[in-house]
Amino acid sequence: MSPPDPQCSYFLCMASNLFAYFTLCIYIPLSVLLLLCIYLGNESFFFCNDES
């Protein structure tokens, strides 16, 4: 059994880091904003006001 290709391992590591970054920095904040929008129902939020 040969050791794994370091290039492949590096790519997988980078991919997992990018996914974690995307999840923490984009998906979670958007989810929180959406939940706040639904919970508060405040039309002062520009992302809540569909009728402009």
Image: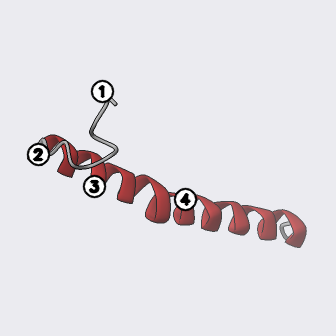
Label 3 CA crowd tier, 10 Å (few <14, some 14–19, many 20+): few
SS at badge 4: helix
In the rendered image, the quadrant that contains the N terminus is bottom right
SS at badge 3: helix
The amino acid on which the numbered mark 2 sits, given as a three-letter code, is Tyr
The residue carrying mark 1 is 51
| Label 4–label 1 contact, CB within 8 A | no
Closest to the observer: 23 or 33?
33
The residue carrying mark 2 is 39
The residue carrying mark 4 is 22
Mark-to-mark CA distance, 2 and 4: 24 Å
**Labels 1, 2: front one:** 1
Q: Which badge, 1 or 3, is on the more N-terminal residue? A: 3
Q: Which badge, 3 or 4, is on the more N-terminal residue? A: 4
Q: Horizontal and vertical percent for residue 9?
A: 78, 67
In the rendered image, the quadrant that contains the C terminus is top left
SS at badge 2: helix
| Label 1–label 2 contact, CB within 8 A | no
SS at badge 1: loop
Mark-to-mark CA distance, 1 and 3: 22 Å
The amino acid on which the numbered mark 1 sits, given as a three-letter code, is Glu
Mark-to-mark CA distance, 3 and 2: 10 Å
Label 1 CA crowd tier, 10 Å (few <14, some 14–19, many 20+): few
Q: Which residue does the image show at 17% across and 40% down from the upper left?
A: 38
Label 2 CA crowd tier, 10 Å (few <14, some 14–19, many 20+): few
Q: Which residue does the image show at 19% across and 42% down from the upper left?
A: 43
In the image, residue 50 above or below residue 46: above
The residue carrying mark 3 is 32
Q: Horizontal and vertical percent for residue 27?
A: 43, 53
